[in-house]
Image (tube, rainbow, N blue to C red):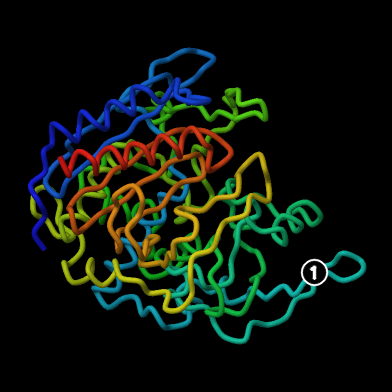
Amino acid sequence: MSAPTTDTNAVAAAADAVIQAAPTAGDGVPGVVAGVTTDKETVYLGAAGVRDLASGTPMTTDTTFAIFSTTKALTATAALQLLESGDLDLDAPAENYAPAVGELQVIEGFDNAGQPILRAPASKITPRQLLLHTAGFGYDFFNETYNRLAREHGQPSIVTATMRSLQTPLLFDPGTQWEYGTNMDWLGQVIEGITGQRLGDVLAQRVFGPLGMTSSSFCLTEDLASRLATMHQREADGTLTPMPDFVPPADPEVHMGGHGVISTVEDYLKFIRMWLADGRTDSGQQVLRKETVEYAAQNHLGELKVKMLPGVIPSLSNDAEFFPGMPKSWSFSFMVNEEDAPTGRPAGSLAWAGLANLYYWIDRSNKIGGYWATQILPFADAASVGGYLEMETSVYRALKG
């Protein structure tokens, strides 16, 4: 697939204009790092604002971020490698690889005493369902049943990165609905079961190493911590409050395949570039085969559609939906917009986001993608998502000349 010639200077200038305005546009953001890449090279990487409103430390392009759910595609890539090698069967019971996932039951509500009503699932969870978010898992900040389990039954938050936080009931029988949740964390457990290694070691050897992602890890090392952007809370009046104590665990009990990586925008652009370049690194090494990339990038959700994510815990997320009214499906493991987006992103492109207002897109037809990183809660913050969509729109405007 050949892409149009990209005027990289125009793209960089368009993106930078948005980035530099972001700290003061609307309610503003403390700081942002963002970048744009083609299948050949990073054409823009820029920073604006500060890492921390309290200290005023400038945001720089080597700032590290808790990247939350933009971790998911990294985990999916390792799973696809195991699919290529024949070590992973997408339709085998996931409990063959991660026995603990087979112990979970379906919750059908709560009895009069407030206790969960549980039953056995009608079928076994498969790795395919974990990749597609159809296995039955949710998140407490997007699902009231999980939120009630947290409030009334002490179910730990997923951000604790503990095994206990993963051991939640299913919301429905596997394969029957789409619900965004801890599926990719369980896929990480599947990968660990196959390889006999911790997920972070698998990614380091198979993804981070080949791609030269030198600032990406599940562990908050001293080096990564020294460059970490501070989390900020958007208050009801629009102001921002630094949360210096909201930091990723230095050595998490579980390497959470759905949200646990700390990284930089520069590193993540290398990952996006690999997906644009049919699975190749800058040096020509194949992380994934071209046919695997093409297969993975398709809609695998069938007739099911991606739904709006309701903000059940307002401090963590607003109601969130990309391009409301437009049908969206799911691939291995990205959202797919089924129609051309108003930003200029064509139908069939890949994208997703992270809880602290991190966003990316991968447009394989035009061979261009980008990543936007802030550290703001709740998710779908108007200033951050608005800035990201403005950046994407400006990039496509520059592409069209």
Side of 301 where 148 appears, left or right = right
Residue at far right of view: 113
Side of 363 where 176 appears, left or right = right
Q: Amino acid at mark 1?
A: Pro
Q: Quadrant of residue 7?
A: top left
* Coordinates of residue 92 in the picture (x, y in percent): 43, 83
* Coordinates of residue 74 in the picture (x, y in percent): 34, 55
Q: Residue at x 55, y 28 (%)?
A: 232
Picture quarter with the C terminus: top left
* Coordinates of residue 147 in the picture (x, y in percent): 71, 55
* Coordinates of residue 119 in the picture (x, y in percent): 72, 80
Residue 86, relative to residue 356: is it above or below? below
| Number of other residues with Cα within 10 Å of mark 1, as a class: few under 14, some 14 to 19, many 20 or more | some
Which residue in the protein does label 1 denote?
Answer: 116
Residue 280, relative to residue 90: is it above or below? above
What is the number of callouts on the image? 1
Q: Residue at x 22, y 69 (%)?
A: 294
Between 134 and 36, which is closer to the camera in this rendering? 36
Side of 246 where 392 appears, left or right = left
Q: Residue at x 58, y 46 (%)?
A: 159
Between 175 and 299, which is closer to the camera in this rendering? 299
Picture quarter with the N terminus: bottom left
Q: Residue at x 29, y 52 (%)?
A: 345
Q: Secondary structure at mark 1?
A: strand
